[in-house]
Amino acid sequence: MTRLAFILTILLGGSLAAVMTAVAVGSVPLTPAETLAVLTGGGEPLHRTLILELRLPRTLAAFATGGLLAVAGALMQVLLRNPLADPYVLGLSGGAAVGALLAMLAGLGTVVVSGSAFIGAMISTLIVFGLAHGTGSWTPTRLLLTGVVVAAGWGAFISFMLAVSPTEELPGMLYWLMGDLSHAHSIWPAWTVLVLVVLAAMPLGRSLNVLARGPMQAAALGVAVRPLEWTIYIVAALVTATAVTVAGSIGFVGLVVPHMLRLVLGNDQRIILPASALAGGILLTLADTLARTIIAPQQLPVGVITAMLGVPVFLYLLHRSR
């Protein structure tokens, strides 16, 4: 068994365990036998409704969102050649948040809110890329600084919207900004994007490995550096926009997961990208399970849990990188 197959086998086992745990744990706990009976087509009617209509869709949405964020983080760290870059560093979440909050203020439904978030994220992508490119070429540093400034602008606009919004609208808006999977019902777009991106990125693993060492070395070894950088940026933006559309802004998954995997598995993108998809899914699935059970029957935004886990890990990584 190759190293990649061995790692993926372990992560697939962990993924299955995380999904089984998520669908079994809740205000009505289920035994493994009861959970397995429902998943294999049997079980009691109440258990079938609880799992198939409530817990399983949310669990699958959490897994896909975590995988998308982790893959986007891995790609952004290669593009910016910064191990502490994350999917939101270029202001995508700010654009998505503005789109979603405008739809909420207009009283539109969940589907329209999700669509508005996606449109906002893609508009932010075009703004950042257009400003960073300017009349000449762009560099990772220029792209990063442009993204930070655009993100600050979106943040100011979000604060203004929250200040002038009706009081009854604020809880839903704040939950969306902190990351919330309670309304994540349409899972197939996220799963489709995740599978296609991982399958498409793995053949590019060698080129990504070379690019991570610097554009001059990559060009000397025959890699088309500029088209590859454009491809990474567009794919990372699409993946991030899809994740934000499903669950709002969930921090630290795209930062912590690729970096921790790189410490354990090395820097081979042919391993890091599929491993990030699985490990990110495991992390967010377990975090969402904790978010809906820690103070049950009330639920916490899953972004609160990921932040509580991610902040100490991020500080540790900063200390370790000195």
Image (cartoon, helix red, strand yellow):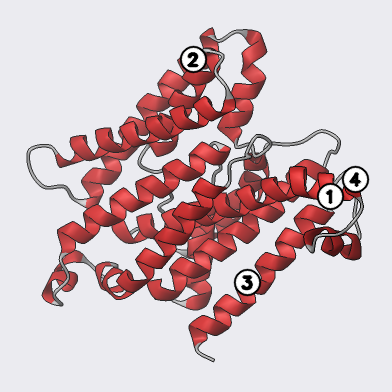
Task: Quote the CA–CA distance across marks 2 and 4.
Answer: 42 Å
Q: Earlier in the sequence, mark 2 or mark 3?
A: 3
Helix, strand or loop for disc 2: helix
* Residue mark closest to the camera, 3 vs 1: 1
Q: Which residue is mark 3?
A: 12
Q: Which residue is mark 4?
A: 46
Helix, strand or loop for disc 3: helix
Helix, strand or loop for disc 1: helix
In the image, what residue occupies the spot 45% across and 63% down? 321
Quadrant the C terminus occupies = bottom left
**Of the pair 214 and 288, the residue shown nearer to us:** 288
Q: Which residue is mark 1?
A: 48
* Residue mark closest to the camera, 2 vs 3: 3
Image side of residue 258 versus residue 218, left or right? right
Which residue appears farthest toward the front when viewing the image? 41
Disc 1 crowd rating (10 Å Cα; few below 14, some 14-19, many 20+) is some
